[in-house]
Amino acid sequence: MREFLAVIWLLLGCAVAGMAARQPSARADSLQRLLATSQPDTTRVQLLTLLAWDRTDDDPLAAVRYGRQSLRLARQLNFRTGECRALLMLGWAFLRSGNYPTAVQTQLQARHLAEAIPYAGGIIHADNALGYAYAEQGRYQTALRYYYRALALARQHHDNVLLTPILGNVGQAYLAQGRLDSAWHYTWQGYRYDLRYHDRHSEIGDLSLLGDIAARRGQPVEARRYYLCSIARSEGMPVSYALCRSYLGLARLAQGQQSGQVLLYARQALLASQQGRYAKGVFEASGYLARRMAARADSAQAYRYLLMAAVIRDSLFNHSRQVQVQALDFSEYLHQQALAEQQGQAMAARRQYWSRVALLLLAGFTGGGYLLLNRRRLQQQVAFAQERQQLERLRAEQVLAAEEQERRRIGADLHDGLGQLLSVVKLNLGALRAELEPGLRESQQQQFGAALDIVDESVREVRGISHNLAPYVLIRRGLAEAVRSFLSRIECASRFQIHFEALGLEERLDPAVEMALFRVVQELVQNMLKHARATTLSVQLIRQPHQLTVLVEDNGVGFCPTTLASQPEAGMGLRNIQSRVAYLRGTLHIDSRPGHGTSISIEIPLAPAN
């Protein structure tokens, strides 16, 4: 009877919490007061968008209402950036309510608008949201493609505030695939960005995710610490998904040790999910509680928890049905807007077509003679420009080929010439020492030993220089293995902590591309060794269907790229890197400032595979 009353009390508490969840937060109250006194201008659009974002987690239906008001007003004012932000917030509201098709449709429209404005922040937001939508549906490869696109654009624009939540999302996708090392790398990097840029919302989610990774790695103490820290940081924040994950993680850690704690944590996860209207968390927490009761052979309690979950599901279903109605109405609204835009574009295209026809006829009568006279001259200019481009590229290819050939020749000469001579010197010194050893004094024997050690060191130095000049591993096994071998030699010879990751490089690239990229990585790493004074180094090679991305990061002293480029006597290594990247038709992005380390990304276009 007592247990039955406890369940009824929990049901009432969940219902009361659900009613409380519908009430706006203190921040939302402040925004509503500002909204009541605002005029129908761009400021009102921004206030409505902020209100939509504030209610996204606790009441998606209210968020949809505010988002639609913001969208209508932005379109009336022709405020394109505000229209894009309103679409982004609407997409997140549909995403939180579990309506993934409408969320994807809305985010795609926001992305198209951001490309047309242009608005780089909107493109990054949309790609991140699209990746999250596909990850929630279990399509992790598609999600990672969107995440990587958002990461590249955020790094290109040096937008570290937008970069912060994307890293944690990448880590979550890798965790779902069981790739724990990659999950830890990206999530920890995202957590450091959270602290640096004070993104508390992302920090809470990354802490709970770090707890999940530590638990999967078999580190219960670390996992518990991350879960508790996430819960402590979430006070007053609408982050029901992170709270549900942390409490369920604590329940699983306590399993088999403290049954009372297990049930307490699971109930907290259920309560947090219900308060935030996080449907996925409600189902997970209620199912977990029912399984725990069934494992304790308490079928009555298991049934009551399932009954309680059904009550909550019914309540959430009614709310989700209202969101679905809003989504259908909004989808029809988007469809009508698209039709109107298509009709407008068709009319504009027809007007433009007839205008061009008239202009062409006029130009044909007035400029026909001129075109005939100058046609041959233009053809000669085009042919000359094409020939000059071909000659410039051929010259660059020949310069790089000659450079590599000279490197190999010097490496072979060092290995076969100087290396062999040093080996002969070592043999002769050893033979002379063996012959004279009975009559040598102790100081003379020490001098012989020191001479032999110097010769040994010289042989190793010559062999290392020869291998760097002629990378035989690159020729035999490809770019990834050559970079791995190069970094392993550096790690063995220094106190650096080096992280290397290669994705999608199972097939070989064009030999010229591999050689140029290897020299670029070699130059970047050697520059960091000489100047960065770093302790950790990260190198990533990521191949996509039509692009290869190279990411090199360190935690060193950093530098100012603009100042370095303006000094003719400095930055020779950087200019060599830029020339090789330009030869490959790639782009180079440098993110560095004094005292904050260096991050260099290189994007090389790849020809389609045969």
Image: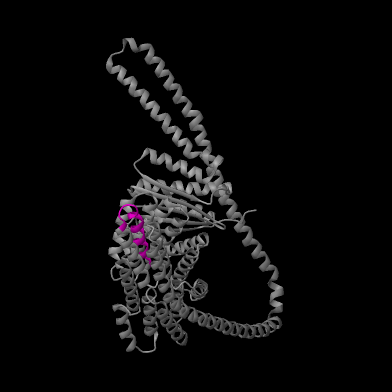
Looking at the rendering, the stretch of residues picked out in magenta corresponds to 241-259
Closer to the camera in the image, 425 or 307: 307
Query: What is the tally of numbered marks visible in this picture?
Result: 0
Q: Residue at x 42, y 64 (%)?
A: 287
Most common secondary structure along the magenta stretch: helix
Q: Position of residue 133 (x, y in %)?
A: 48, 67
Residue 605 shown left or right of residue 323 in the figure:
right
Most distant residue in the front direction: 1
Q: Position of residue 592 (x, y in %)?
A: 36, 58
Q: Residue at x 41, y 79 (%)?
A: 63
Closer to the camera in the image, 3 or 167: 3
Q: Residue at x 65, y 84 (%)?
A: 350
Q: Position of residue 464 (x, y in %)?
A: 44, 35
Res. 595 visible in picture: no
Up-down relation of residue 394 to residue 379 (above or below): above
Residue 268 shown left or right of residue 375 in the figure:
left
Residue 494 shown left or right of residue 516 in the figure:
left
Q: What is the quadrant of the N terminus in the image?
A: bottom left
Picture quarter containing residue 204? Answer: bottom left
Q: Position of residue 371 (x, y in %)?
A: 69, 75
Res. 61 visible in picture: yes
Q: How is the image coloured?
A: one colour
Closer to the camera in the image, 184 or 439: 184
Q: Is residue 395 rendered magenta in the image? A: no
Closer to the camera in the image, 591 or 36: 36
Q: Residue at x 40, y 18 (%)?
A: 430
Q: Is residue 256 rendered magenta in the image? A: yes
